[in-house]
Image: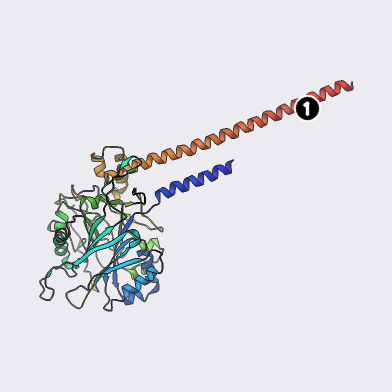
């Protein structure tokens, strides 16, 4: 009987686990320092890169430096030899003002429903005359995903919606010394993409060099991508996206568009530490790159047209670090600015100069958004659970940083879990009751048999006498 209960419990837990283990559409961004033929000649480095990229459905690679333009295709071949669901590749022109050139590349899985609708290089002026803005102009790509999309279906009694389907990605690797100017001008790239395609669901992503000495606390108000209320920065200023001992949030996700923002699982926004995930040395990690990748998940519709919600994205023993906005829409004050940072990493073959310590004051001049520091994450998660039981317009839920439909789904999953546990406990109690009754009956039967045997002995003795 107990063996039967064990089998039942295993099946039940497997079903419950399967319900919550579905993955969302995972997007990543990675500055792979000086990616080219030399890096591809190092098998241990390539192996880490392959393990990293294959975690994602859509992945941006920056700082591709290869005049032969063969390294990235060799990498694609090796990547597709490892998976049953091959990646496609879209590659920018070689970009740069001089002989120093870089390229952007997007790896994406068609099996995940992804396709490229359109693409163009942003025209920022004549590079030869020096009248351009970007050292490496953005490569603007319009994606479509058949796995996502607005859906007003019902899951566990909750109304779903605001799941992104048609969206634009604008990658950029800014020049460190011009990070303020270039990051500000990304606002114009956004306006150009919106005017061209009529889509306001846009994400700027990449190595913006937007921290430490390149963008100091007093320079944020010069960046329209920061001050304009349409944008939310999903990687906070307290993040560290560098592999070395520096502590700088160079790599960012900046999102515009309500559909896009509410389609993102904010609990998934994190820095992927491949050193800890793959248990490699610091030296090997730095050979791979001087940056960690950053990542996030989009909510995804399953085959029944219902939304799959993923609550966390820590994989392969990774030690990830979440840096989340406290609200899905930018509406409050930026209160985090890390002090006294130093920079010693390398960008484009050139050394980053040391950083002078920033003043020990918080940046409170911007009134458009708020990011949460790593020390506030635990409190934010607690607020999220409380907000799930309240009206979606309450202040508690706004501070939790979870879209309204996500909070409702979290509440539903909590009650579903309680109900499931109740079923298991009830089943266990029933089995124990049956076992007790059976034992009682057996005990009573043995007692009666003993009495009958004793009575027969007495009668026999009397007859003998």
Quadrant location, the N terminus = top right
Q: Position of residue 345 (x, y in %)?
A: 26, 68
Quarter of the rendering containing residue 33: bottom left
User: Please, which colouring scheme is shown?
Assistant: rainbow
Q: Position of residue 31 (x, y in %)?
A: 28, 66
Residue holding disc 1 = 453
Quadrant location, the C terminus = top right
User: Could one spot residue 145 in this view of the protein?
Assistant: yes
Q: Nearer the viewer, residue 321 or 93?
A: 93
- 89 shown above or below 401: below
At 34% from the left and 56% from the top, the residue drawn is 320
Q: Nearer the viewer, residue 373 or 92?
A: 92
Q: Position of residue 440 (x, y in %)?
A: 63, 30
- 433 shown above or below 51: above
Q: Position of residue 34 (x, y in %)?
A: 28, 72
SS for callout 1: helix
């Amino acid at each position: 009987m107990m063996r039967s209960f064990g089998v039942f419990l295993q099946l039940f837990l497997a079903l419950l686990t399967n319900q919550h283990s579905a993955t969302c559409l995972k997007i990543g961004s990675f500055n792979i320092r000086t990616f080219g033929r030399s890096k591809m000649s190092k098998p241990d480095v390539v192996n880490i890169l392959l393990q990293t990229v294959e975690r994602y459905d859509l992945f941006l690679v920056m700082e591709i430096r290869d005049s032969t333009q063969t390294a990235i295709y060799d990498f694609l071949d090796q990547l597709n030899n490892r998976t049953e669901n091959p990646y496609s590749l879209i590659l920018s022109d070689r970009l740069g003002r001089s002989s120093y050139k870089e390229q952007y590349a997007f790896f994406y899985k068609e099996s995940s429903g992804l396709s490229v609708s359109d693409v163009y290089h942003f025209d920022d002026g004549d590079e030869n005359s020096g009248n351009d803005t970007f050292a490496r102009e953005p490569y603007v790509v319009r994606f479509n995903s058949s796995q996502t999309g607005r859906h007003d279906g019902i899951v566990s009694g909750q109304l779903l919606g605001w799941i992104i389907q048609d969206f634009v990605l604008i990658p950029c690797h800014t020049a460190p010394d011009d990070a303020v100017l270039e990051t500000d001008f990304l606002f114009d790239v956004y306006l150009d993409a919106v005017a061209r395609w009529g889509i306001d669901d846009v994400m700027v992503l990449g190595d913006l060099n937007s921290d430490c000495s390149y963008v100091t606390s007093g320079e944020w108000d010069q960046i329209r991508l920061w001050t304009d209320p349409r944008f939310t920065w999903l990687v906070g200023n307290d993040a560290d996206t560098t592999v070395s001992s520096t502590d700088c949030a160079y790599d960012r996700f900046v999102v515009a568009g309500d559909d896009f923002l509410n389609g993102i699982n904010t609990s998934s926004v994190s820095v992927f530490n491949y050193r800890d995930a793959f248990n490699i040395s610091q030296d090997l990690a730095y050979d791979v790159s001087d940056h960690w990748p950053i990542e996030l998940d989009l909510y995804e519709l399953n085959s029944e047209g219902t939304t799959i919600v993923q609550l966390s994205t820590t994989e392969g023993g990774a030690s990830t670090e979440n840096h989340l906005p406290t609200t899905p829409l930018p509406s409050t004050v930026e209160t985090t600015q890390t002090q006294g940072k130093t920079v010693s990493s390398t960008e484009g073959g050139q050394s980053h100069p040391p950083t002078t310590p920033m003043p020990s004051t918080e940046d409170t001049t911007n009134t458009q958004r708020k990011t949460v520091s790593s020390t506030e994450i635990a409190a934010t998660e607690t607020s999220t659970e409380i907000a799930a039981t309240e009206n979606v317009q309450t202040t508690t839920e706004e501070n939790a940083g979870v879209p309204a439909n996500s909070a409702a789904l979290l509440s539903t999953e909590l009650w579903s879990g309680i109900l499931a546990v109740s079923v298991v406990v009830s089943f266990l109690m029933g089995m124990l009751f049956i076992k007790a009754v059976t034992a009682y009956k057996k005990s009573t039967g043995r007692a009666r048999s003993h009495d009958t045997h004793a009575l027969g002995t007495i009668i026999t003795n009397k007859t003998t006498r």
